Image (tube, rainbow, N blue to C red):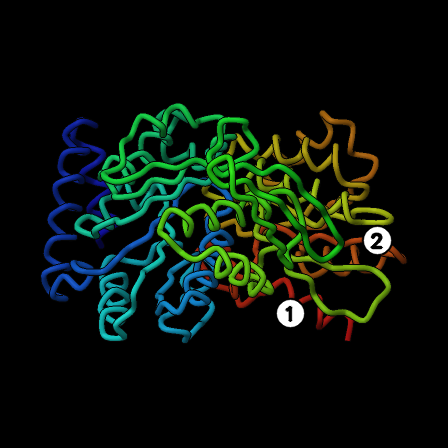
Amino acid sequence: MKQLLVKGVRGVLPKGTVHKIEEGYRKGRVRLVRARYGNPAKNLKVIAITGTNGKTTTLNYLNEIMKEAGHRTAMFTTAVIEINGHRKINDLNATVALTAEMQKFFREAKREKVDYVLLEVTSHALDQHKLDGVPIMAAIMTNLTQDHLDYHGTMEKYAEAKGKLFAANPQFIVLNRDDEWYDFFNQFQAAGQKITYGRHDDAEVRVTKTRLFRKGSEATILLDHHDELELATALPGEYNIDNMVAAATAAYVLGINLNDIVEGVANLEGVPGRFEHVKTGKDFDVVVDYAHTPDGLEKFLTAAKAITKNRVILVFGATGDRDKGKRPIMGEIAAKLADRIVLTDEESYNENPDKIREQVMQGIESAGGSGKTTEIADRHEAIKKALGIATKGDIVLITGMGHEKFRIVNGERIPWNDADAVKELLE
């Protein structure tokens, strides 16, 4: 009923008028729900992170660091939700939950007397005022690359939505000095301190050396141009080094002991659906990852190629009802970096999955990858195909779904998990 009403209003009123009505409704609703739950976030120390990729992993690193330092934490990310050590998979199919659910989370965090709340924040949530009234102590930026243009329209509008987190004048701001959009986010001022990280010569926390391994990576970072710190993680890939350093930088500016930063980073053994190795007992590797943007897919494939002795076999597709422009781009990236491709369905939502695959295939063909691509609509059969052609030293990458426990097809929630599908097929 609500959706029909919204559709009807949008159909008869001018766009500007509709926007004002929606803005008023959203702001009012957040205030009402917040009041109903007693404004539980009011006195919490909230660390919020935004960006296109790397948010979940960065927060999981930071969560381990804070716990190593003896702090109680609560964390809400796309993959996992944790309150004072009690952890569960986020099966809501949303990074930021409905307003009432978020207020419940804050209320529980307050009851558990946590020291810090770690929050993953999307551009949609910021644009729709879902977290209005939540005091942000520290704001972290990972990167900005193409995504969600179906909603924002342009990269500039996308950046503006992300910028709302930093415009709230948090005490601390942590920025990626290597990011293409760094100058845009650098315009915002912190009430206390702003700090940058990255490989750029001007980064205040600078990566000076990296070492990549099959099941992990190491980095040397220079703090404020004088103190050197050695970090080691169980997660492989240059992009996970970026995530690790972002978390270390945030902890550093918050005054966490350097030894706790080192130990906390090392404590993170993995994140569900983020370069998640599936134990198979085979002589080839199988990895599940959430990569669903061009930048995420490129970084994931690049990391896999760097640690794989033989072929990279990719099982992937694209999501329905989302930014259609990124589909052929992802196809081109797959064609350039994967040795074999199995193109399949992901979550089609309300779109025709055949059309989605067709758009991805356009990119594959334009990059000359059609000869190494097999198209199998059924995701189960696609994974079966990839596992069937894998040989010693290969790595099978399955992307797009990550930790998720169901797929949405034609509006229906279908139980599904990529890692479980692999295990079932290999039993």
Is residue 307 rendered to the left or right of residue 157?
Answer: right
What residue occupies the far front of the structure in this picture? 226
Q: Quadrant of residue 306?
A: top right
Rendered residue at 59%/46% (across/down): 241
Return the residue nearer the eye: 19 or 48.
Answer: 48
Q: Where does the image place residue 112, in percent across and percent down from the top left?
A: 27, 75
Q: Amino acid at mark 2?
A: Asp
Mark toward the start of the polypeptide (2 vs 1):
2
Residue 318 visible, this angle: no
- Give the image quarter of residue 220: top right
Q: What crowding class fits label 2: few (fewer than 14 Cα within 10 Å), some (14-19), or many (20 or more)?
A: many
Q: Quadrant of the N terminus?
A: bottom left
**In the rendered view, does 245 fall on the left or right side of 18?**
right
Res 394 label: 2
Left or right of 370: which side holds 277?
left
Across and down, in percent, residue 145 comes to 49, 32
The residue under the point 58% across, 61% down is 266
Which quadrant is the C terminus positioned in? Answer: bottom right
Q: Nearer the viewer, residue 178 or 275?
A: 178
Up-down: is 95 above or below 355?
below
The amino acid pointed to by label 1 is Asp
Q: Residue at x 22, y 35 (%)?
A: 10
Give the numbered dot on residue 420.
1
Farthest right residue?
Answer: 392
Residue 419 percent across, percent down from the top left: 65, 65
Q: Residues within 10 Å of mark 1 (few under 14, many from 20)?
A: few
